[in-house]
Image (spheres, grey):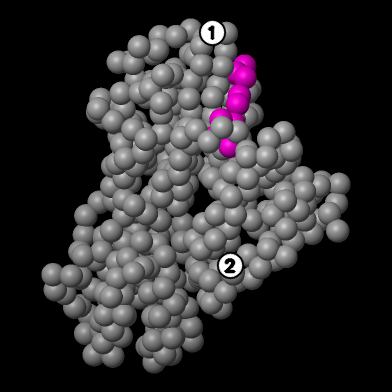
């Protein structure tokens, strides 16, 4: 039974249908396949679904749950306000987000972007649902209007080593390492340089598992070819605890934000696995490519266009690097010089951090970049939506 604090979540689940909702939760459990690593990754990826279910059950609410409860209320109110065709479109959009690898992040990103523009003093229309337009929102202030297209891009698109594939490899390797550590107690570091990458659908994943198993059984310390370099060494730096919680901060400082890390323990031993692709990640370039691919089809050209991007599948350290090293800014500004951006007056970028967490001053900032070549770039009425932060 929903509590007072979970009423909006319960109402949104009611729109989905409780039977379908419970079926979806079962699908997510099945995706985990009994793997703790995959389960934790799915819980993170489907944080909104997890929060909605916690709220529905009346469980304690944290920061994410409070944001989800508020945005769920806005979604329910929108559904009630839409006409028949609009409700059909919104219902279809929600249904699509609950299939396969889909998540409800798209809906909640849309509600977040709409709320931000309302807070800036704009009248907001959900044109995508209401009228079936390619853009999602129309915002208006005074005599000026703009079209807003919301989109999600995964940082995985810019990585040669996918996190989902890494988790599958760790699950495969875990029993072998448990056996090996029982025979070789101590502290070890297995470094992997994956020159040809590692992706979930690749046939190379079983082959990599086989190479690690052979390395352990052969008593060798290294194995290398054009595809990958494997090296097994003693783990030389100490940590407060010889487990994942104790070692991970030290490992992250040692290997950087791009490394894929895992800690295996057993029989009094510990083995750290650290993997890198053969080249640097290109997440910012993937964001630019995504914007260039969607912008021509999302805007009418009769009003200024704003691309509101949500960058998924990043962790805080990676997002800080992309932001602080101006990689996202560089990608956005390069995109704004391309023909595909001719209707785009501004680009904004959020990560989950900005979606769910406020800054100390109470705001949740976004990255925003104006296109100086667009005719509306100097519009005073649109300034708060387009001026670069």
Q: Tell me if mark 2 has few (under 14), some (14-19) or many (20+) residues whose alpha carbon lies within 10 angstroms of its own.
A: many
Q: Percent x, y for residue 351?
A: 49, 41
| 153 lies above or below 363 | below
Residue 269 sits above or below residue 80 on the image? below
Magenta residues span: 120-129
Question: Furthest-left residue in view?
Answer: 226
Judging by the rendered image, the residue that carries numbered circle 2 is 28
- Answer with mark 2 or mark 1, whichever residue precedes in sequence: 2
Coordinates of residue 3 in the picture (x, y in percent): 85, 51
Front one among 146 and 54: 146
The quarter of the image holding the C terminus is top left
Q: Image point 68% across, 61% down: which residue?
A: 21
Secondary structure of the residue carrying tag 1 is loop
Residue receiving disc 1: 143
Q: Residue at x 38, y 22 (%)?
A: 301
If the image is split into quadrants, where does the N terminus sit? bottom right
Above or below — where is 301 with respect to 350? above
- Residue at 79 percent across and 59 percent down: it is 57
> Looking at the rendering, which quadrant does residue 30 occupy?
bottom right
The label on residue 291 is: none
Q: Secondary structure at mark 2?
A: helix
Horizontally, residue 134 falls left or right of residue 141, namely left
Q: Position of residue 150 (x, y in %)?
A: 48, 36
Residue most extreme to the front: 84
Q: Residue at x 28, y 30 (%)?
A: 340
User: Taking the image as drawn, is residue 133 in sight?
Assistant: yes
* Label 1 CA crowd tier, 10 Å (few <14, some 14–19, many 20+): few
Viewer can see residue 240: no
Q: How many circles with numbers are drawn on the protein?
A: 2
């Amino acid at each position: 039974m929903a509590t007072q604090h979970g009423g909006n979540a319960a109402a949104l689940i009611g729109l989905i249908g409780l039977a379908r909702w419970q079926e979806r939760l079962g699908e997510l459990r099945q995706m985990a396949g009994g793997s703790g690593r995959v389960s934790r990754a799915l819980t993170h990826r489907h944080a909104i679904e997890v929060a909605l279910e916690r709220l529905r059950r009346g469980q304690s609410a944290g920061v994410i749950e409070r944001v989800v409860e508020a945005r769920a209320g806005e979604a329910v109110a929108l559904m009630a306000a839409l006409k028949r065709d609009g409700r059909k479109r919104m219902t279809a959009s929600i249904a699509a987000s609950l299939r396969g690898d889909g998540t409800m992040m798209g809906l909640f990103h849309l509600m977040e972007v709409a709320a931000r523009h309302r807070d800036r003093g704009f009248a907001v229309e959900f044109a995508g649902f209401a009228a079936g337009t390619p853009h999602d929102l129309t915002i208006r202030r005074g005599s000026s209007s703009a079209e807003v297209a919301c989109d999600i891009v995964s940082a995985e698109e810019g990585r040669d080593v996918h996190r989902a594939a890494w988790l599958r490899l760790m699950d495969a390797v875990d029993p072998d390492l448990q056996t090996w550590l029982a025979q070789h107690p101590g502290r070890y570091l297995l470094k992997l340089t994956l020159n040809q990458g590692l992706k979930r659908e690749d046939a190379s994943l079983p082959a990599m598992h086989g190479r690690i198993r052979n390395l352990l059984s052969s008593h060798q310390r290294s194995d290398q070819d054009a595809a990958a370099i494997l090296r097994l060494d003693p783990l030389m730096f100490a940590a407060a605890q010889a487990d994942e919680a104790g070692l991970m901060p030290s490992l992250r400082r040692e290997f950087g934000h791009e490394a894929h890390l895992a800690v295996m323990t057993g029989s009094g031993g510990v083995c750290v696995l650290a993997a890198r692709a053969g080249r640097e990640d290109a997440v910012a370039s993937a964001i630019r490519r995504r914007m260039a691919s969607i912008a021509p089809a999302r805007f009418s050209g009769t009003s200024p266009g704003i691309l509101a991007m949500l960058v998924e599948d990043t962790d805080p350290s990676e997002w800080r690097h992309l932001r602080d090293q101006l990689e996202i800014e560089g990608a956005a500004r390069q995109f704004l010089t391309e023909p595909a951006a001719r209707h785009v007056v501004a680009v904004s970028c959020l990560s989950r951090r900005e979606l769910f967490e406020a800054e100390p001053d109470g705001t949740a900032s976004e990255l925003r970049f104006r296109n100086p070549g667009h005719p509306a770039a100097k519009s005073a009425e649109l300034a708060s939506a387009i001026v670069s932060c």
